[in-house]
Image (cartoon, rainbow, N blue to C red):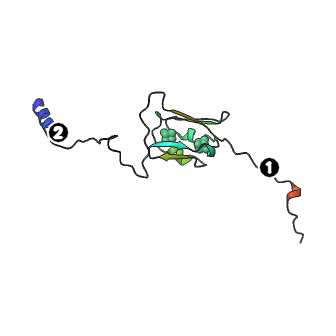
Amino acid sequence: MTYFEMTKTVIKSLFSRPATLMYPAKPAKKTALTRGHVTINPDGCITCRSCQRKCPTQAICVEVKEKTWQIDRLRCIVCNCCVEVCPTKCLAMDTQYTAAMTVHGGIYKVPVAGPKKKEPAPDAAAKPAEKKE
Ligand code: SF4
Ligand code: SF4
């Protein structure tokens, strides 16, 4: 009985279209909502660590003293949480999938700008004189 079922499946498969997609020979279909990989604009990162706290797989590591931002792409499940929570919008979701990588090849670390320096308060002399009523 099992052999009969198996033979039936083999013959059916021989004359039907493949169930799998021919990626990467044929490019995958992508839309604006496709989640490929997380990207960062290092100039916008203020090392607030919101992305690190929100990440469900601990894929992100922000070093405040070193001013670096790191992601382990093999841990990332492209949930988009870090992108949504970033206060400066310096994280984005790219639609391009990452290439296959080795076990240590997923680490991507970049130097970032860090906290914005506060502008010095203008001294009293520079302030315009208030009008007396
Ligand atoms: S997309 Fe999700 S899993 Fe990937 S780094 Fe961001 S929060 Fe973590
Ligand atoms: S990437 Fe965004 S959320 Fe993450 S530390 Fe930098 S500013 Fe904060």
Q: Quadrant of residue 36?
A: top left
Q: Callout 1: few (<14), some (14-19), or many (20+) C-alpha neighbours within 10 Å?
A: few
The residue at the point 12 percent across, 30 percent down is 2
> Which image quarter has ligand 2?
top right
Query: In the displayed structure, would residue 4 be above or below residue 122?
Result: above
Determine which of the numbered discs, if any, sits on residue 69 in the image: none
Closer to the camera in the image, 111 or 91? 111
Give percent across and percent down for residue 41. 58, 45
Work out which quarter of the rendered image holds the C terminus and state it.
bottom right
Determine which of the numbered discs, if any, sits on residue 120 in the image: 1
The residue at the point 51 percent across, 44 percent down is 81
Closer to the camera in the image, 76 or 17? 17
Work out which quarter of the rendered image holds the N terminus and state it.
top left
Q: Callout 2: few (<14), some (14-19), or many (20+) C-alpha neighbours within 10 Å?
A: few
Q: Is residue 89 left or right of residue 123?
A: left
Q: Is residue 107 left or right of residue 44?
A: left
Give percent across and percent down for residue 85. 56, 47
Give percent across and percent down for residue 7. 12, 33
Determine which of the numbered discs, if any, sits on residue 13 in the image: 2
Give percent across and percent down for residue 109. 57, 34
Do the CB atoms of the residues marked 1 and 2 lie less than 8 Å apart? no
Classify mark 2: helix, strand or loop. Answer: helix
The residue at the point 50 percent across, 42 percent down is 38
Find the distance from the CA under tag 1 to the CA under tag 2.
73 Å
Amino acid type, label 2:
Ser
